[in-house]
Amino acid sequence: MAATLTQRCWAAPGVKLNPTPQTLTRNPKPKSLSLPLSANSTCSLFSFTPPPSPTFTKSSSSSSSVRTAVAAVESDQLSSAEKKPSRYYFVVANAKFMLDEEEHFQEQLFERLRLFKERNNEQDFWLVIEPKFLDKFPDITRRLGRPAVALVSTNGPWITFMKLRLDRVLSESFEAESLEQALASSPTNIEFKKPDKWVAPYPKYESEWWGPFLPPGSKEEAKV
Amino acid sequence: MALVKPITNFGNVVTPKFGNTRSTSSKTSSTMIRMSSSTKKSSTKKAIKETLLAPRFYTTDFDEMETLFNTEINNNLNQVEFEALLQEFKTDYNQTHFVRNKEFKVAADNLQGPLRQIFVEFLERSCTAEFSGFLLYKELGRRLKKTNPVVAEIFSLMSRDEARHAGFLNKGLSDFNLALDLGFLTKARKYTFFKPKFIFYATYLSEKIGYWRYITIYRHLKANPEYQCYPIFKYFENWCQDENRHGDFFSALMKAQPQFLNDWKAKLWSRFFCLSVYVTMYLNDCQRTAFYEGIGLNTKEFDMHVIIETNRTTARIFPAVLDVENPEFKRKLDRMVEINQKLIAVGESDDIPLVKNLKRIPIVAALASELLAAYLMPPIESGSVDFAEFEPQVVY
């Protein structure tokens, strides 16, 4: 038991972290739909309650710098339209880890998508299944379970944060002339074995949840 | 920080060196005490029994914190990671999330009987726990401003989150015609002192376990909406992403202080904190099964799920974690619950204090031996891949 978990945690020396590992308990019952969207969609129509007490709020200072950050990203994309290469940052690991095991990762991506929509920001992050850019990184591919999935973004600090969160991922960056070029991928079937023991008091997230995060136009090829 | 503030002073059971709680002040639950500091605090304060397991307020050695994160003294601080975290906290995902609606009052009015009291206690404990996070982070934000403005600002932004959470819970209490007087709480409660490194272990675990508790309740209720008896749970999904991010920040803080992660002492402390946090939660929740059953959860199954997931998360940073997936671990927890019940029964008996204390001795000894046995179970080596010696061989 201990050995298995260790392996899970570490992919112990020389042991290849198999994309279909002997998972212990994270395993679904029959599929059922539970996308973690908008629990609060009905909530915001009513009167806005000011933060709890004047003695302990200071949320206002934070928004301006966000806009700056976003503005920087946008100008980044503008420049890519002018054929100036942009830098893309990514974390990458095997598909099982990225899409099946790390359920909080899905919550994060949907949270970010929700925020970008709320603030009318252009999406600057994508999931790329079997990305072609990996060919430029033999040191990474040598150590990567396949199929691989990368989280790619033009926002470098955010990818640094995602590396901190996910930990069991490799991180790098590259330049590309266009978005299409940066996010090109090889057609791959992604299918995960249903875990045979699922003890969580809720259903597992539905497979295919990653659809909204695939690069524009790539949904077809990623289909199972 | 989240539903529970699961730190106790079991320290003196397992190892005497550990910072004891300096006092067991009484938890002041206040009926109709407004939180505004100007109004006079009058009225019926019913003292709730303070136990080892009640949520705590923390304080730490702020001078040592200043030194630890002084950018001039400490050159190997990973400022890139901190800058990235700062951007993430500034993004403020939940800026407009905590907005109430009319459902709250209606739902509260519909909660009657024993469940009502349990809900009030839940809101009260949660509010206290979040508020204690607010106080600690706020002070750290203030104190670190000069030596490390980036880290300081992150603390301030985290205190923003905690204030929001506490305020939202306190608003929830108002649905039950109650309010915690947070200003009073700040002054009246006793603070537990932890050295910085213990603050890191404890708050990391507290935030991550908070995330797993909230998300588990949220996803369970999403799948079983018939148990959705109070709308606050609908906010948990976004809410707990804050907790998760807070945990990430403590991860980064510990990575910036590898001496807290890379030796045998760190491993012992890691296991110790895991154990005290898991045991505290388990014993706490097993005293409140009515709450979990009231929202359709099996308390022990819920807790074990939370413990296992928290442990897996924690294995990405702590150098050692407990083998909580070994069935023996749960058996030990269950025995502790039984022993704890005996302990509570003695406290509630009509014996004179001396007799009570005498009766407690063998029970406390039994609890201590279970704890020690759980602590000494073979651990699991773990940690961030950033620190792994064999990292070059890891296949991702």
Image (spheres, coloured by chain):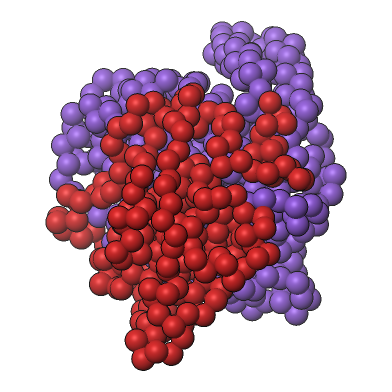
- Colour red maps to chain: A
Q: Is residue A159 above or below residue B381?
A: below
Q: Is residue A125 left or right of residue B327?
A: left
Of the pair B374 and A71, the residue shown nearer to us = A71
Q: In which quarter of the image is residue A124?
A: bottom left
Taking the view exactly as shown, the residue that stands out farthest to the right is B264
Q: Quadrant of residue A119?
A: bottom left
Taking the view exactly as shown, the residue that stands out farthest to the front is A187
Residue A68 showing in the rendered view: no
- Colour purple maps to chain: B
Q: Residue at x 67, y 17 (%)?
A: B328
User: Looking at the picture, how far across and down is residue B174, in whole percent?
Assistant: 27, 43
User: Looking at the picture, how far across and down is residue B65, in whole percent?
Assistant: 70, 64
Q: Residue at x 42, y 68 (%)?
A: A183
Q: In this view, does A34 lie above or below A113?
A: above
Q: In this view, does A119 lie above or below B315?
A: below
Of the pair A145 and A164, the residue shown nearer to us = A145
Q: How many marks overall?
A: 0
Q: Residue at x 28, y 49 (%)?
A: A37
Residue B113 showing in the rendered view: yes
User: Looking at the picture, how far across and down is residue A36, in whole percent?
Assistant: 32, 45
Q: Is residue B114 left or right of residue B313?
A: left
Q: Residue at x 71, y 58 (%)?
A: B386
User: Looking at the picture, how far across and down is residue B303, in whole percent?
Assistant: 51, 27
